[in-house]
Image (cartoon, rainbow, N blue to C red):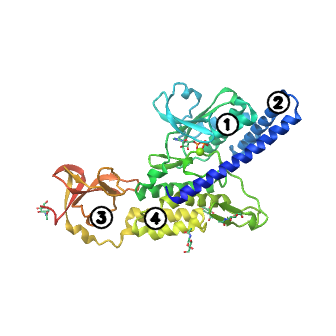
Amino acid sequence: MPAAVGKSLRAATVLSVAVLSVLVCLLLGSVHRLGSGHAHPEEELASLRAALSQRLAQRRQEILPLLSPGRDEEPFSAWESFLRDELTRGPAARAPLGCGALRDAQPLEVLGSGYTKLVVKVTLAGGEPVALKMVNENGIDMGKCVEGFKDLHGCRQLVSSKISKEVVLLHRLRHPNVIKLRGHCVGDAGGRVTVILEQGTPLQMLRLLQSPWEDRFRVCLDLVRLLHFLSRSPLGSVALLDFQPRQFVMVSGELKLTDLDDASVAATPCGRHADCFLQFPHRNFTLACSSRGLCEGLNEKMNIYNAYRYFFTYLLPHQAPPGLTHLVERIMNATGELKADINETLDAFEHILQLYQSGLHLDKLPTSALRDYNVTRGMTTSGDEDYRCWPSYSQQGCVLSVHSATEAAHICNSHSQCTSFTLTGQKTWAGRPLATFRSSFSFLVPDQTSEVYVKKSTAV
Ligand SMILES: Nc1ncnc2c1ncn2[C@@H]1O[C@H](COP(=O)(O)OP(=O)(O)O)[C@@H](O)[C@H]1O
Ligand SMILES: *[C@@H]1O[C@H](CO)[C@@H](O)[C@H](O)[C@H]1NC(C)=O
Ligand SMILES: *[C@@H]1O[C@H](CO)[C@@H](O)[C@H](O)[C@H]1NC(C)=O
Ligand SMILES: *[C@@H]1O[C@H](CO)[C@@H](O)[C@H](O)[C@H]1NC(C)=O
Ligand SMILES: *[C@@H]1O[C@H](CO)[C@@H](O)[C@H](O)[C@H]1NC(C)=O
Ligand SMILES: [Mg+2]
């Protein structure tokens, strides 16, 4: 793990310990005050209960403005039916799943858990695999609440209200890079909310660090597309307050945001520029205070810097194609210094994608390299002797994505073991063909989709 990750992890741990101890002190203080104010334990419990209901009411109040326009006039108790109405509206809408869908669901395994929620993998009665999100009974949120309020049912409701907020946000912020909401179920008297989601796999940063640049670039591009959407979402500009890789999952190679309960749509009021202060562990920024008395682009900028520090620094520069490194460095600098807004950042990413897909970044590659090879179309090889390269798409051999046979010939020439390569019919997400490089093979076998290139100097 890079030193910077270790450092920020340590910083985060120190911070959370500090926050926790402050909370514990506050809590002990308030329990103490309550104890001295109320002679009877029943009174104490009653006042705790009142405090908990007040918290719950506050949480619900936060959800109302997130519902469709006009709906926020209506009582909270109706939010669930609004959602049901909305989810079923529109020609292409798939029927949302409800409690009924969960009746015969088979829980398979735990996919992940956090402070608030537990996520399990299940297969619905019809065979559809989904992820269920619910209150994490052993999580920090439940633990702190039960310790403070001594009311298991009430705390489940309070923690569930975070999940309700997430359901509303997932519904209103639909985007290809936000996890798909399949439905939800509200159990016993609002005590438990279960969310039914498209199933993904938790983002594994360490594995991603070892994968080809093309796949790492895709994660960053997906993230930027998401942030572009969030900056002008139906709810306004959304900031992700808890922006960390663990709030995302992968679904068939695509990055999707799954933890939305810490999303904020609030604008930051200001009187002068100094009020628009953005603080990060290694960097501070002061943004402009607009004439309308709001910090300009604060949510957007906060997201961009977090994308830079949690994703780009680890995923983007390392092993970038030589023809693209100057563009990647420009993005790193512009996002790390908050010099570009999300529109400019997205444009820069899409430009790199376009160059990469069209092979324009390879313009200086001489095509003469291909003259060293004898090509046989409609064939592939058998009895291969493979060698390994990095970062290969296959564990056993050397499989890389290329733009063309010419690029593959250059790669083969640069590997001392390489004597032939095959362009397979397979393509990466970016539409680039996969090439298999090898040191030798026994014979050719027919394969409509493949072409075998054998180095002339070594062919016998
Ligand atoms: N749809 C999903 N598919 C697979 N894993 C998921 C899915 N949603 C969440 N997870 C995993 O569950 C963990 C907890 O979910 P999250 O919403 O982040 O809860 P919390 O608010 O407690 O952090 C995530 O870190 C992620 O690894
Ligand atoms: C950021 O601001 C805080 C608070 O003013 C300050 O203590 C810290 O040293 C600053 N950090 C950097 C890297 O400038
Ligand atoms: C951006 O570039 C400037 C000037 O080259 C340099 O001083 C700065 O450290 C760079 N910032 C980042 C975040 O890369
Ligand atoms: C970003 O682009 C959108 C249109 O896609 C435009 O409405 C918006 O004003 C742009 N934002 C900035 C800061 O230029
Ligand atoms: C190239 O292939 C052709 C036919 O496939 C063969 O006749 C020729 O000898 C090959 N040349 C070399 C140098 O391998
Ligand atoms: Mg989370």
Residue type at tag 3: Ile
Q: Tell me which label, 1 or 3, sits earlier in the chain.
A: 1
Label 3 to label 4: alpha-carbon separation: 21 Å
Name the quadrant containing residue 277: bottom right
Residue on which disc 3 sits: 411
Report which residue position mark 4 lands on: 352
- Name the residue type under label 2: Ala
Marks 3 and 2, Cα distance to the nearest angstrom?
74 Å
Split into 4 quadrants, where in the image is the C terminus? bottom left
For marks 1 and 4 on the same chain, the one whose residue lies earlier in the sequence:
1
Q: What residue type is labelled 4?
A: Ile
Helix, strand or loop at mark 2: helix
Mark 3 and mark 2 residues within 8 Å of each other at the beta carbon: no
Q: Nearer the viewer, mark 3 or mark 4?
A: 3
Amino acid type indicated by mark 1: Gly
Asked if residue 120 is positioned above or below residue 188 in the image, the reply reads below
> How dense is the environment of label 2, judged by Cα within 10 Å: few (below 14), some, or many (20 and up)?
few
Which mark is first along the chain, 2 or 3?
2
Q: Name the residue under label 2.
A: 46
Disc 1 designates what residue? 143
Residue 200 picture location, percent across and down: 49, 42
Q: Distance between the residues labelled 1 and 3?
A: 56 Å
